[in-house]
Image: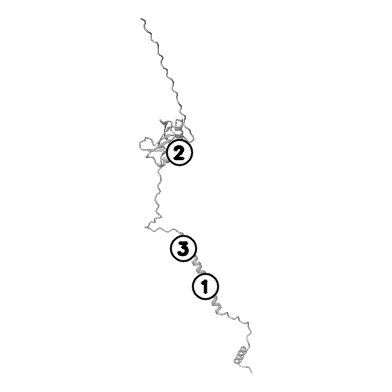
Amino acid sequence: MDENPQEEQINQEVAEEKTPEVGFPMAAPKPKSKINKLVIFALVLLVLVGGGIFLFTRSSKDKTEDISPTPAVEGLTSPTATTSPSVTPTSIDKSKISIEIQNGTGIPGEAAYLETQLKSLGYKDFKVGNAEDQTETITTVTFAKSLSSSIVDEITKKLEEVYKDVETKTSSTQKVDILIVTGLKKGATPKPTTTTTPTPTKTPTATPTATPST
């Protein structure tokens, strides 16, 4: 006798429940505590790395701001920003300075030699002659009071390079700007003086007078 289809389905389900299922063993799930520790460690590491990067970039930015110049505030003037104007010295035209050179040694060519030396410095207005005293050993230079200190220093330095002794003076009455009476140059000796012997004078001889005859 055929079984009822409904019974046959029930029997089949019972047989499937009794038959043990054959399969691979499933891996045991990892403990949740280990996963949480790894996640926390990763988060802490990420925070530390991010904080280090932030501090490094901040310090670099601060250094850059310190090096950069402070912007000027409109309406305020910094004392260090203002600079006093530099004083430019006025140039002196040496060609207009009059110089008189007098030879005081009696040695020929001394005044002309000094003229050549001073021309090399840029001076052009010269008057050359002989001094009244031809036995000078010290070089005397007289400057007008109106001359600048730079001219005085330059002329004095040049004379000290050439001559043994140099004496400087100032005057407010002389006509020329610089008056120089030359003395002995370095290494020079005074010119020997020539002594003249007086010529003997003849005494007149008495002429005999004739006596009148008586």
Q: Residue furthest top?
A: 214
Residue closer to the observer: 17 or 156 = 156
Residue displayed at 54% across by 76% down = 37
Task: Tell whether 25 sits left or right of 148.
Answer: right
- Find disc 2 in the rendering and name its residue: 160
Residue 194 position, x and y percent, is 46, 27
Residue 59 position, x and y percent, is 48, 64
Q: Quadrant of the N terminus?
A: bottom right
- Find disc 3 in the rendering and name its residue: 62
SS at mark 1 in the image: helix
Q: Quadrant of residue 42?
A: bottom right
SS at mark 3 in the image: helix
- Find disc 1 in the rendering and name its residue: 44
Of the numbered discs 3 and 1, the one sitting upstream in the chain is 1
When the figure is inspected, residue 3 is found, relative to residue 133, above or below; the finding is: below
Q: CA distance from mark 2 to mark 1?
A: 87 Å
Amino acid type of the residue tagged 2 in the rendering: Glu
Of the numbered discs 2 and 3, the one sitting upstream in the chain is 3
